[in-house]
Amino acid sequence: MKQLKRNLLSVALASAALMLAVQAQAQEAQAAASAQAKDKKTEDAKNLDKVVVTGIRGGIERAIDIKKDATSIVEAVSAEDIGKLPDVSIAESIARLPGVAAQRVAGRAQVISVRGLSPDFATTLLNGREMVSTGDNRSVEFDQYPSELFAGATIYKTPDASLVGQGLSGTIDMRTVRPLDYDKPVIAISGRWQRNSLGSAANQGATGNRFSVSYIGQSADKTLGFSIGYSHADTPIQENQVGLYEPWQAIGNGWRPGVPAGTYYSDGIKALRRTGYTKRDGVMATLEYRPNSVWTSTLDVFHSQAKQEDTANQFEVHIGGYNGGYSPGLNVANAQVNSNGTFTGGTAQNVYPLVRGMYNNRKDKIDAAGWRNEFFFDDGVKLSADLSWSRAKRDELNLENNTQLLPAPQLDSVQLSFVSNGFSQLHPGRDYSNPANLYLANTIYGSGYGKVPKVDDELKSARLVASLPAPASLQGLFSSIDAGVNYADRNKDKTQPEASILLGSQGVTPIANDLQYGLVDLGFAGVGLIPSWNVPAAVARYMTFNPSDSAAPYLIPKAWTVMEKIGTAFVQGNIDTTWGSVPVRGNIGLQIQHTDQASRSRVWDSSRPAGQEIRPYRNGKTYTDVLPSMNLAFSLADDQTLRVALARQVARARVDQLRASVEFGVDTATGKPGAGGGNPLLDPWRANAFDISWEKYFGNKGYVAAAYFYKQLTSYIYTQTRDGYDFTELLKGWVPPPGMTVPVQTTGTMTAPFNGKGGKLQGVELTASVPLEMVFGDALQGFGVIASASFTDSSIKVLDPESASSVGSGPIALPGLSKRVYNFTAYYERNGFEFRINNRRRSDFIGEIGNFAGNRTLRYVVGENITDAQASYTFGESSRFKGLSLLVQAYNLGDAAYRTYAGSKDRPLEYIKWGRTLLLGASYKF
């Protein structure tokens, strides 16, 4: 049985190869297809960037062409025109594709889940090259990529052997234009003004702007092409939020006076108005040189930099029995408990609220360059050499100010009402609107705390690929053979100096008027008005902040580096033949990946002399994966295609899981070592995958499709506590303290990410893209719909002890998995008028967020229902305003909230609204 399971995929692939061989005996040998540069775009679905038709229908038709011509199962989105992907960010566009869902961060679609798996399982490419990220892990934050700079994106749901950098759930390839695909120079300019419906607050207005300009040009002889695009965005941040402390726990008798034992209770609540801005500038340039039909050289350069600065102006109260130790203590009057045993309201007496300023300043920078040279020869041989480099940097500053009413204690009674489908309410008895009465002091939460996280992620790679006609002995089996090698070298560094923010020599003080921004209204939560102020200026004037990554033992593991060196080799036979009367396209191939992974960090060793407790620590491993794959596309009658795919897939562990940093010690009473942290010895996630898809096309105007996928994950990575872990490396240099009488053991208990049991993941995806005149005739000319529904199920259950306070300590579903995802778009395009309305929905899922400590944590997220709309008018060829388009867009029309909860929905954690966004704009192309 074990042998059967191990070889199941190999047997299936071998059977398919045998079928091909038998069929080949009954056919004549086929001549190898010529690989001339002039028609290479029709041979490769990945390079269908040429723009012929503009507008909504043009973008849809180009995306359909990509899907139809691909040999793999793919989804695609294509720009309507130069610099006109249909959404504010490329993440919004990708999230509309079948089987894809986005998670909002700060109101923006930022991270993407493919086929029910978390963003960690997908890989993102830029023009076929893997990209770095500014986050702690691999998943790309897509809102850093301006949609105006891209021609489109393709998601490969099934890999082939030649797809380097492939993900386990999918591979997202963002594509830019190729200037020699255009027959004349083009200049496109666009500008948009936007407003947030929440209005202005503190020092931030409600309006922002976007601007972009793109140029595509060619030399007179069409041998040299150049394109460059620039995009600028200045977006306001306005957010209303009520959050409750985690965990919700069943309390014991007398734990929270006035609340019955066994009640699920949260120990604190906060209400805030977050204000700030995000500024982003991006540049994308391409230089393409094609002096003849033999050689094409392409240089791509990308740069993006973003700055986000915001402050959470916050009212917060601890209701868990801690008020600074003042008497009398907590009493909850008129406690209300629902039928599920959850505390839903009452009056918390003798509490000591705070007014806080929580400041964040984040700067991100991404740079990337790639140089590809392609050579085409008369005998059908093609050679390609590619060099690429990308680097991402993140510099962040987090500061907090804590103020309270003085002289202490100024205890208060706060009326509470907790709800799951709206803003929970907290009504204080005292007035907190006068900044002169609020003092920076050593409050019940201290005077403040700060962090300075930094990330540096760099990836260098080189690739060499050859494509040649199949030898005569294989021409009945394969039309051509691709073979190649790739080498990638990636280093990711993370540091996070931290420290308490202490009062300066002046001592307790209110914040001066010249640092005050004004009052913000927390009436949505029942609080009323509170002050807002310039937090970094207050820290500079009144406080001291000296962050360090080595001043205390708990800081030592927060600095780490992960190194990966990955060598990839592949061979792939391409199929373009006929089985009986059925045309068949596709490929069968083998990819081999050799990974050398390591991490270095530091360990606090308390056995060493004072001042020498910090010592370096490094660990790692190597492993090799053999990844067979097969993609077959059968062209059936009436423009139908049946696709079948088999593959073995891998996804490397999250970068923060591979960190070598640990908190380590030895029990001097037993001699047993113990530690907790990362694990550089992890194997990747591995899966065997099967896909089948039926597609019915109506030329390139529309299609309907039904697909089924199945993935058997042979392992999954989650945090576990294991005994018997080998501590030999960590024990090197450890000195038993005086008086220790027992020998030091070499094995002990380790809490870290480990490879554990996997399971199955399967789903069905239904899609339709139909112009309505095809169904109802000319009466609905110009109207169309695009609809998709995805249904996903998994038997995999994981544990995440680090998130136990929000998702519990028991088994949970896969992070990122929504069992149901729906997308619906209705559009109209005729005589220059365009209108589109889109709705995307996903069911509840477990999402990933960053907590106060800067670590990834999981939360139950209520499913979302987001509606956007867009209308525009483009002046025709005969108008003196030819080339001008006017635009109005609205995002999050229903003002949908972002909601998280702990275990059950009547135990809310966050309820957040970012408001609606209205954009007015114009674009001009000439």
Image (cartoon, rainbow, N blue to C red):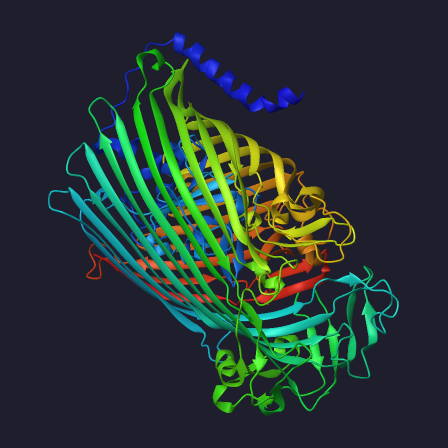
**Quadrant into which the C terminus falls:** bottom left
In percent of width and height, residue 312 lies at 55, 73
User: For the view shown, which residue lies furthest in the left direction?
Assistant: 220
Residue 734 seen by the camera: yes
In the image, is 484 to the left or to the right of 800?
left
In percent of width and height, residue 372 lies at 28, 40
**In the depicted structure, whether residue 776 falls above or below residue 357:** above
In-front residue for pair 877/414? 414
In-front residue for pair 859/585? 859
In percent of width and height, residue 407 lies at 69, 91
Q: Residue at x 81, y 64 (%)?
A: 338
The number of numbered badges drawn on the structure is: 0
In percent of width and height, residue 488 lies at 40, 41
In the image, is 459 to the left or to the right of 373?
right
Residue 775 seen by the camera: no
Q: Residue at x 59, y 83 (%)?
A: 530
**Quadrant into which the N terminus falls:** top right
User: For the view shown, which residue lies furthest in the right direction?
Assistant: 253
In-front residue for pair 692/538? 538
Q: Residue at x 50, y 28 (%)?
A: 626
**Quadrant of residue 446 within the rendered picture:** bottom right
**In the depicted structure, whether residue 215 falls above or below residue 348:** above
